[in-house]
Amino acid sequence: MSTTDITSDLRDPVDAATYLFTRLKQMGIDSVHGVPGDFNLVALDYLEGCGLKWVGNCNELNAGYAADGYARIKGISAVITTFGVGELSLPNAIAGSFAEYVPVVHIVGTPSTLSQANGMLLHHTLGNGNFNVFADMAANIAVDVAKLKDPRDIPSQIDHALAECYLQSRPVYITLPTDMVKKKVEGERLKTKIDLSPHKNDPEREDYVVDVVLKYLTAAKNPVILVDSCAIRHRVLPETHELIEKSGLPVFVAPMGKGAVDETLPNFGGIYAGDGSNPGVRERVEGADLVLTIGQVKSDFNTAGFSIRTSQLQTIDFHSTYTRVRFSEYPGVGMKGVLRKVIDNLPKLNVQPGPDAPENKIPASEDSSDPTITHRWFWPKMGQWLQEGDIVLTETGTSSYGIFDTRFPKDVTNISQVLWGSIGYATGSCQGVALAAKETGGKRRTILFTGDGSFQLTAQELSTMIRHQLNPILFIVCNDGYTIERFIHGMKAGYNDIQNWNYQALPAAFGAKEGTYKTYQVKTKQEVSALFEDKNFSSAPYLQLVELHMPKEDSPDALKLTAEASARNNAKA
């Protein structure tokens, strides 16, 4: 059957690119990240007509980081690259999204289906006629691979991929060959939005699990709740918050779960990360006779080097695809339905008070007469400056551990990449986060904390922020290199050093016009305090960049503990 015969029977036919981009728009995506290339250019012509804006990043890696950040705010994102040379610059970012359960749609413009079938020797290929090699690579970090080759199948392929991306909260990979862009496909389906209803548990199995959970919860004398990142990724925060408030139980968060819980609640106790916790938190969690974990991720950096000491015999784990009660696992019984019924049937519980959460108080041991900005002084001080609704990005290293000592105001979101831990992530992500925040229409501040070494990996995205008139506040911690690496190994080694830059000069170098940005350099506690007290700095409607100078060998206590554990684990290996 010819293509003409196929399309003549379609109801309300639309071009394949129109179908794909309309679906993205329907799912809440307003801007698409990426880099143009000859195999995706015709497809990019369709974006504007489908109500989508093109971001245009400096490189594909940065585009992937930005798409990750955008998805963490808006629920899903899309990034477009070209075949081979473009898409292979992206996997590091996509792997991070896969590891940390972030739904990113990766669309690749590929050579025509005819060129692929004939094994033509084209540019951007390996020269061996194999056009599947890159898709095969991508399949390891995607929950669905959709190769759009037949107009009859394209709508269903797109719908399935997008549904899997959203529901599993992980990346998908879609190829769009150049000769498929304008092919007519069935458009009738666009009148019905993709079904994104969450998985429903088998009622009988769910009821049984709920009964078991309530049995142990009612019998417990001093239970606690521990919330982690997958509670955010799998969209159970409404149920989590309701459980916290209705039960009144002491609640703690893991590092990756920072920001998942309202930290102004009286029963919020702070961050639990084993030896990386403050003593009161560690004693309360590890002394509980029942720990309810919601979306926990037991990675090394999330547990301060596997130093958590909670017994599985006294733990109930809630996850997206299973529930584990002590040593009994119930596959296919996801947490959303179970939590809902636990809340609805919650009896009066034994509630013992938890420890007082950190109150952004500067430690008494900090010498106020010493002008040096230390991590022990800075992070509680910064917490006093934060505002309700802020979005705070912290880079892997000193920032992501320093934030342990900051208690957030209400509705503050924290974005970091604790599991994948790719340095440079936070700057690229900041662009996507700031854009998403702008599109949601609110006045939320986007605030980035990144090290000088990390910033140098993805500094070009400052240019994209300027281009799209995004106005984040960027703090670059200037401490002469890779501090987290120094504490793991090589405190004075040359490979942990970097070339110092004049960071204040970068906005102008990237084309920012005078009056559209402001830069600062702070080297003393007094200068930090003055900056935080400056109302113009706190609410300026333009981009701001701060050089924050700290000692080379200073770091948050939690980072030191984690680095020491990492070094021990490496030595054992």
Image (cartoon, helix red, strand yellow):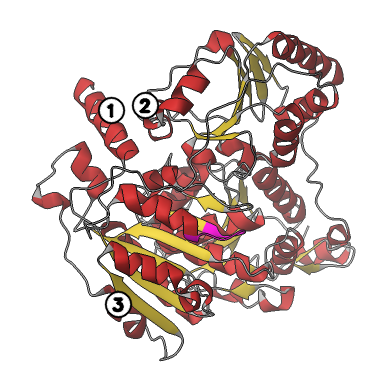
Sequence-wise, the earlier of marks 3 and 2 is: 2
Residue 386 is a magenta residue: yes
| Residue 396 x, y percent position in the rendering | 37, 48
Residue under numbered circle 2: 275
Label pair 1/2, CB-CB below 8 angstroms:
yes
The amino acid type found where label 2 is placed reads Asp
Of mark 3 and mark 1, the one earlier in the sequence is: 3
Tell me the magenta residue range.
385-391
Pick the quarter of the image with the N terminus.
bottom right
Q: Is residue 484 left or right of residue 147?
A: left
Q: Quadrant of residue 445?
A: bottom right
Say which quadrant the C terminus sits in. Answer: top left
Quarter of the view holding residue 488: top left
Nearest the viewer among 407 and 568 is 407
Residue 89 position within the rendered picture, expressed as x and y whole percent measured from the top left: 39, 58
Q: Which class describes the residues within 10 Å of circle 1: few (<14), some (14-19), or many (20+)?
A: some
Relative height, residue 271 to residue 14 (above, below): above
Q: Residue at x 43, y 22 (%)?
A: 308
187 left or right, relative to 441: right
SS at circle 1: helix
Residue 118 visible in image: no
Q: Position of residue 419 (x, y in %)?
A: 43, 39
Question: Distance from label 3 to label 1 (Cα)?
Answer: 36 Å
Residue 77's label in the rendered image is none
The answer to whether the residue labelled 3 contacts the one labelled 2, judged by CB atoms less than 8 Å apart, is no
The residue that mark 1 highlights is 565
Q: In this rendering, would 339 be left or right of 60?
A: right
| Residue 504: image tag | 3
Q: Residue at x 55, y 29 (%)?
A: 296
- Residue type beneath disc 1: Ala
